[in-house]
Image (tube, rainbow, N blue to C red):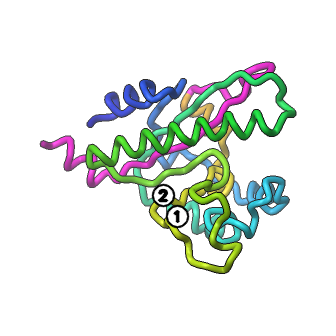
Amino acid sequence: MNETQMKELARREGFDNAEFLGTNQLQFDSALRRYCEENACGNYGNNYACPPSCGTPGQMEEQVRRYDRALVLQTIQKVEDLTDSRQIREARALHNERTWNLSDRFEAEGITGLRIMAGPCTACSTCAICRKAPCRFPEKKASCLSAYCICAEKMAESCRMPYWCGENTVAFFSMFLPDDGKLKEKEEK
């Protein structure tokens, strides 16, 4: 499956935009970690995929830089009220569900990779970290753009995707970073 086919599959899965970007084009800013530390979402220290458990900003960047490229995925959704956290959570959940569905389809084609989501990991209703137990689904654990300290606005600009989408509209971003060794092997067949 080549890049064009992967982007087309993403659009069929319901993404408004899907573009490949070299990981060398991603900008990281460790100062973004403060948004996680403010704990507005309540997951700081309460989710294996969130800080501080997921790793330092440097470790997270290093993890991304192991890959050559990323498929940046975006959904743009209308909501009645931007201040209604329930509506925002539902829109983000739909975006992340599409990301999981798409990455599962890639895996069915033999393309494995790293998933970076919009918002905290929700593989479990309550993360095992809260019981001081090991992660129950390490293969489903996925951190968000904020945990990686990726500058989402600059990423969107590099992909020519809108970041601010207008009144009562939210845009969510996630990424799938294919393991190029597996991808190249698949394309050669």
**Disc 1 + disc 2, Cβ < 8 Å:** yes
- The image shows residue 66, relative to residue 18, as above or below, that is below
Q: Amino acid at mark 1?
A: Glu
> From the image, which quarter does the N terminus lie in?
top left
- The span shown in magenta is 160-189
Q: Which mark is residue 150?
A: none
Give the labeled residue for mark 2.
65
Q: Which mark is residue 62?
A: 1
Residue 98 position, x and y percent, is 51, 37
Between 59 and 11, the one nearer to me in the picture? 11
Residue 78 position, x and y percent, is 71, 21
Q: Amino acid at mark 2?
A: Arg
Between 53 and 136, the one nearer to me in the picture? 136
* Quadrant housing residue 167: top right
Q: CA distance from mark 1 to mark 2?
A: 5 Å
Q: Residue furthest bottom?
A: 132
